[in-house]
Amino acid sequence: MGYRRDTEPKACEITPEAIWQERRQVLSALLLGGASAIISPTAHADAAPSGRLLPAPRNPAFVAQEPPNSWVDATTYNNFYEFGTDKSDPARNAGTLRPAPWSVTIGGEAQLRGTFALDDLLKPHPLEERIYRLRCVEAWSMVIPWIGFPLAALIQRFKPTSKAKYVAFTTLQDPVQMPGQRSGVLDWPYVEGLRIDEATHPLAFLAVGLYGRVLPNQSGAPLRLVVPWKYGFKSAKSIVRIDFLEHAPKTTWAVSNPREYGFYANVNPAVDHPRWSQKTERAIGAGLFAPRRATRPFNGYSEVASLYTGMDLAQWF
Ligand code: MTE
């Protein structure tokens, strides 16, 4: 991601970080005298998924053109600043998060509100698996089989009032469990938001698992958002509050650097980030010599385009 105000560059600037990781892999491949280690930027790319099983039927309406990434790609190359700004930090450091017991508060402009144990919140919603592409603002992408349920189902259950124009998602704030919150790299807690018509679009998803397992901590346990047509920073992790609001919430990256990160954050090859192009992307795990791919508008999910009819997406980036 970007700079925090005018301080030094942060390790989250993915392009240099990715190149560095790949260089390291090339070096170790050369040292080992083999080529297999450069197939993925991460080591042990064939390691099997681990954690508690969470079987869910695949919804065939949501499958990607590309094969899914490996479990290792998805769980060792993460953004989760509550555990550090390096891609490898969350997998190393997120062991301090206690995803159970967990409760989520539903508040704001809704007929039903309250604080619910996660299990009670999930109970009415059958789980399904959907394969979604996630495209990070830093110009890399992954394809991941998520397990969860449509955000729209949860929203309908709590009966938002006519004043509810936005939905805000707030992450846990606890510097003991999330040691990265002791740093001022972002304003905590991490907050994201969607317009209510975006939030109720059938693609918007609340995930509790991936690859047939419960979410590992670094992936946003125990409850995270997946909004596949938007840059990855909209997909808030470890959610503790969902609020229905009349006005747009102040979202973390837009507060941190409004010139670089907007509220909408729709994947858009035509609107560059001020410091890098969004025209192409690098598929994590595709290998060092794989060509970059063209970024697709809305990350390929063109069915959402009608949500933005009449809006200048260069202004509302
Ligand atoms: N959620 C919280 N709470 N904290 C974060 O730092 N990073 C975001 C998003 N959700 C982040 C977060 C960013 S920048 C991205 S790209 C995605 O999580 C990364 O999700 P992944 O690690 O599962 O790929």
Image: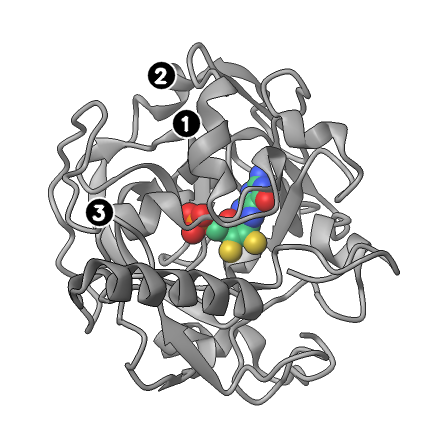
For the point 42% across and 44% down, the residue is 151
Badge 1 amino acid: Pro
Percent x, y of residue 213? 21, 32
Query: Residue 108 — which label?
Result: none
The residue under label 1 is: 222
Q: Kindly indicate whether the residue at mark 2 contacts the one at mark 3 (C-beta within 8 angstroms).
A: no
The residue under label 2 is: 119
Residue 10 occupies quadrant: bottom right
Badge 3 amino acid: His
Q: Kindly indicate whether the residue at mark 1 contacts the one at mark 3 (C-beta within 8 angstroms).
A: no
Secondary-structure class at tag 1 = loop
Mark 3 closeness class: few <14, some 14–19, many ≥20 residues within 10 Å: few
Which is nearer the N-term, disc 2 or disc 1? 2
Percent x, y of residue 153? 38, 41
Query: Residue 44 — which label?
Result: 3
Q: Give the camera-side residue of 257 and 297.
A: 257
Which residue is farthest right?
6
Percent x, y of residue 29? 25, 63
Residue 213 located left or right of residue 110: left
